[in-house]
Amino acid sequence: MHVAGRIEDYALIGDMQTAALVCRDGTVDWLCLPRFDSHAVFAALLGTDEHGFWRLGPAHGPEAQPPRAARRTYRGDSLVLESEWDTPRGTVRVIDFMPPRDTDAPQLVRIVEGVSGRVPMRSALRMRFSYGRVVPWVHKVDGRTVAVAGPDSVWLDTSAETFGKDLTTYSDFTVAPGDRIAFTISWQPSHKEPPALPEPEAALTATETFWREWVEHCTYHGPYREAVVRSLITLKALTYAPTGGIVAAPTTSLPEDIGGSRNWDYRFTWLRDAAITLSSLLRTGYREEARAWREWLLRAVAGDPENLQIMYGIAGERELGETELDWLPGYENSQPVRAGNGAAHQLQLDVYGEVTEALHLAHMTGLARNDYASLLQLKLIRYLETHWDQPDEGIWEVRGPRRHFVHSKVMVWVAVDRTIKLIESGDADGPLEKWRELRDDIHRDVCEKGYDKERNTFTQSYGSKELDASLLLIPQMGFLPPDDKRVIGTIEAIQRELSTSDGFILRYPTTGDDAGVDGLEGDEGAFLACSFWMADDLAMIGRVDEARKLFEKLLALRNDLGLLAEEWDPRLQRQVGNFPQAFSHVPLIDTALRLTASGAYGG
């Protein structure tokens, strides 16, 4: 019986509309069809084998754990996964991928290739719709196996013989050197005609070609290019191609605290995450993705910037109601398992800054002018004119009381500052002097109310003594120069008070005078984005060797395929949180760019 692996045991494959997670033992434990935010067909990641999986690997005893692959890698700069097993009878390879879609029928293709000897293999396919709750009707149609439940159907095509047992579709076969046996599942609305017969080998060639050609557009050729390119591929895989929306992660409810309740659905487009993703893509040569995201943003916000949400569905949906899937026991018994996200209607003023900064960067890098994008910036500032001094839930989406979070105010300042620059460039019209005064008022307010003179550090919120790693963005956003004593004091205070024994950075204290600021029980690991921000800041204040060492320690946390979750648990020494996480891969790229520019690698 298979048990879900550690989070870092998983590989990502996807088609830029949805994604699957493949465990080191050859089991697909997570797949939502047809979109990232659809119900899962395989949900064993958050439950047990009873909730759906697809295992493909060397045959093993009924009570034994499936053997883990001896080696696995992505084929070149692609999202094509190769896993190899060495068995007493020989070596076998499984190639897993999802072809980028030209049609509405998503496919997951698995090709078994004999390398040496004669290896007995088994495919075990247990489809369970609606996050593992619904057993489909499985039957044969013209020699093809189809599973139907309500509006959904999934079709299995293979040249191998199949049989049904215990509500599972099996195939037992043996491969010799040179043998290639393909298995493909395709999703289709159940009321439509069957999907076209797949062509696995042609799809493999097309998928490899797609990724190779996409990576060729990357303009970064500095140190650690492999890590940067893998992060860029991951971000591209998290992009929903039909609309340009970018999901924060392809999973829900992977816990920030193993066994705890900090489990959230990340299969949506956070404006913050998407904006910083856009920034990284623009800075590495990917203008088309930036253009598509800008169009998504304009559609999502529509004519209603006063009601800007912090997140939307991947097609711009506004209603993301949060529910609990109580039939799923959760990853390593971390409950509840959630679908949807109740934070969608929080007030997070920093989002206005991130969106404006992304639009500003798009403008500065020569993305074709969009008059509505400029109009949107002006509308956002008019909203902030009368709302900037309100308390909010902040960047970390606290579920405790609203506060005057310093980072939120800093990002409001960024929104006003970048819009002033747009007007000064002659590409928009607005009340320049009035907004310059507003920018000065916000700056003064933050420096007076969000700064602790006795400790020489900015604080998490007005009147608080606690720190917050988001303060590390103050110099990166240009709010104050890196050599300002208040910036240096803040960096050093965060190193003292929010650093783990490994030297990684926590978001904020979950114990102490302000315990419960986030309104949640339990603890959490080091937030990887914050640790990359620390490396950035150290480089900015001239402590380049220290920055490089921290960056390399962070790179060492990636799994063997170069993927990162949201957090690192220093006690358990493992990745935690949703996976893979855009908000971890973006700052990896940014820090590599900054360190390269700083000469941290000796040229």
Image: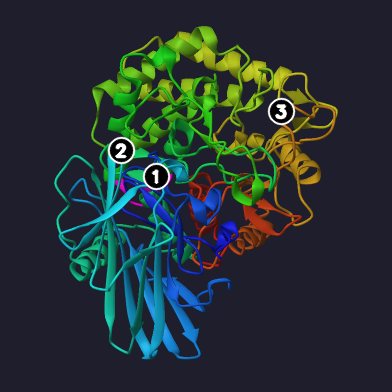
Q: Is residue 491 above or below residue 570?
A: above
Q: Is residue 366 visible?
A: no
- Looking at the image, which residue is at 69% across and 46% down? 259
**Which labelled disc corresponds to residue 460?**
3
Is disc 1 surrounded by few (<14), some (14 to 19) or many (20+) residues within 10 Å? many
Residue in front for this viewpoint, 296 or 61: 61
In this rendering, position of residue 216 left or right of residue 322:
left
Is disc 2 surrounded by few (<14), some (14 to 19) or many (20+) residues within 10 Å? few
CA separation in Å, label 2 and label 3: 49 Å
**Dots 1, 3 in contact, CB < 8 A:** no
Q: Provide residue 445's location: percent of width, then percent of height.
A: 66, 16
**Dots 2, 1 in contact, CB < 8 A:** yes
Q: In terms of sequence position, does the residue under pointer 1 or pointer 3 come before the other? A: 1
Which residue type does callout 3 highlight?
A: Gln
SS type, badge 2: loop
Residue underneath mark 1: 129
Q: Is residue 344 above or below residue 123?
A: above
Q: In terms of sequence position, does the residue under pointer 2 or pointer 3 come before the other? A: 2
Q: Is residue 545 magenta?
A: no
The residue range painted magenta reads 279-287
Which residue type does callout 2 highlight?
A: Gly
Closer to the observer: label 1 or label 3? Answer: 1
Q: Is residue 255 visible?
A: yes
